[in-house]
Amino acid sequence: MARAVIKLNNAEIRVDGHVARLSDTIAESPGILYVKGPNGSGKTIFLKTLAGLNDINEIISTGIIIEPRSTRRWYVPQDPWLITLGDTGLDELLLIAKRKIKRVLSNTRLDKILRKRIAHMSYGERKILEIMKAYIVEPDITCFDEPFSGLDKYYRELAEQTINDLARKSLVVIATNKDINKPGASEVKVLVKQLKDDIDPPIPLAGKGEVIVQNLSIRRGNKSIEINGLKLKSGETSTIIGPNGSGKTTTLLAIAGAIKYRGEIILRGKTGFIPDDTLLVSPGVTLNDVITNLCYADRDCMDKSFFTLRELGVWDRNRPYVALSDGQRRLALLIPQLFSGRAVLLIDSWLEGIDMYRRTVVYELIKQYLEMGGIVIATLPRGDRLDVVEGIPAPYD
């Protein structure tokens, strides 16, 4: 394994008219370099540049030096890759590095995850699989984009332990929008224009609706998911909690009518859905296309949505949707549904991926939506088993 060094000196990155400036720093292996910045600041683009993926996004960078030039690099995205090579997680790892697989399988719970079919894995389980791929390969530089988002307490600890083990041998780069409190770690900030101090978005529009769930039973692989009862009327909220892989997303999809189930689900009023994996939207569309579709081409909804998104730092309506950061994509899917008159909003993984400043603004909008009579059902990776609790999480959850 080569000793890797990253040097930043008046560094800039340009892509699609966006310019990100980076604070000067030097980081070397073994160790961790944290990349901190708000949504859309350029953290992901910087990681892709370090990983040698410049050509994919036509990235132009200056002031970034990586030594030696022959360093092996690896990139782990915030949303797990949709393309996989194996049927199970174990198949995937065996294809990458057979000789190192035994030490991974010494962890009983991890072994259980890896023996699952990838198609049946939860979002969090697929994130763990992507982290384990990097751990198996042991690159000289590994770039992790928000590696802990969407993980419950146990999986987060597993991810942190794995990444820390990797950082004892190589250079790990972690992008985050959260505050960093790691003694001895290096840090680089993505420098962008500050948002306004005060944001005053329009009042959301909510329809009148109702949600009734009784004796819900869903089969998912070899697993059975049961929800006995859930009743919500206008202005009420619930959160589906549980560890990764417990069936939160599956339950939300059943309520939305997207998968088969047994039992009774009554859903009155137009319903909106915000998925945990924001890349499920077609890659060939622009931000304008997404907003137009979610607003049903209603001009008032579109105007309010674009105004609010601009206030939150999402500017170019003609920008490809996939070119947005994960947090920006989540805002693009959520904001127009708050102004479109939907009666019910189903929010998978709550406000994951949105930085704290914007999260506070969005949380207040959702509270206003509830005051207007809307219904919200969210999911959050928390607790030891699948359960439904009253209310929605605080903005910092």
Image (cartoon, rainbow, N blue to C red):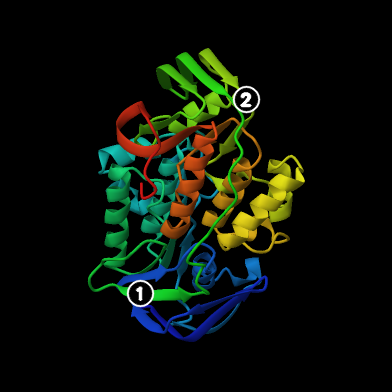
Q: Which residue position is annotated with label 1? A: 187
Question: Dividing the picture into quarters, in which one does residue 253 lie?
Answer: top right
Q: Residue at x 54, y 81 (%)?
A: 12
Q: Earlier in the sequence, mark 2 or mark 1?
A: 1
Total marks in image: 2
Residue 375 vs residue 72, the one in the foreground: 375
The image shows residue 224 at horizontal and vertical percentages of: 42, 19
Residue type, mark 2 in image? Gly
Tell me if residue 298 comes above or below residue 139 in the rendering. Answer: above
Q: Residue at x 44, y 51 (%)?
A: 130
Q: Which residue position is annotated with label 2? A: 269
The image shows residue 134 at horizontal and vertical percentages of: 41, 58
Question: Dividing the picture into quarters, in which one does residue 15 lie?
Answer: bottom right
Residue type, mark 1 in image? Glu
Question: Callout 1: 10 Å neighbours few (<14), some, many (20+)?
Answer: many
- Residue at the extreme left of the image, as rendered: 183
In the image, 89: left or right of 346?
left
Residue 318 vs residue 204, the one in the foreground: 204
Name the mark on residue 367: none
Question: Dividing the picture into quarters, in which one does residue 2 lie?
Answer: bottom left
Please state, as top left, top right, bottom left or bottom right, where the N terminus lies in the image: bottom left
The image shows residue 199 at horizontal and vertical percentages of: 52, 60
> Taking the image as drawn, is residue 83 in sight?
no
Question: Callout 2: 10 Å neighbours few (<14), some, many (20+)?
Answer: some
Residue 271 vs residue 72, the one in the foreground: 271
> Taking the image as drawn, is residue 174 in sight?
yes
Report if the CB atoms under discs 2 and 1 are less than 8 Å apart: no
Q: Residue at x 51, y 71 (%)?
A: 46
Element class at badge 2: loop
In the image, 93: left or right of 85?
left
CA separation in Å, label 2 and label 1: 48 Å
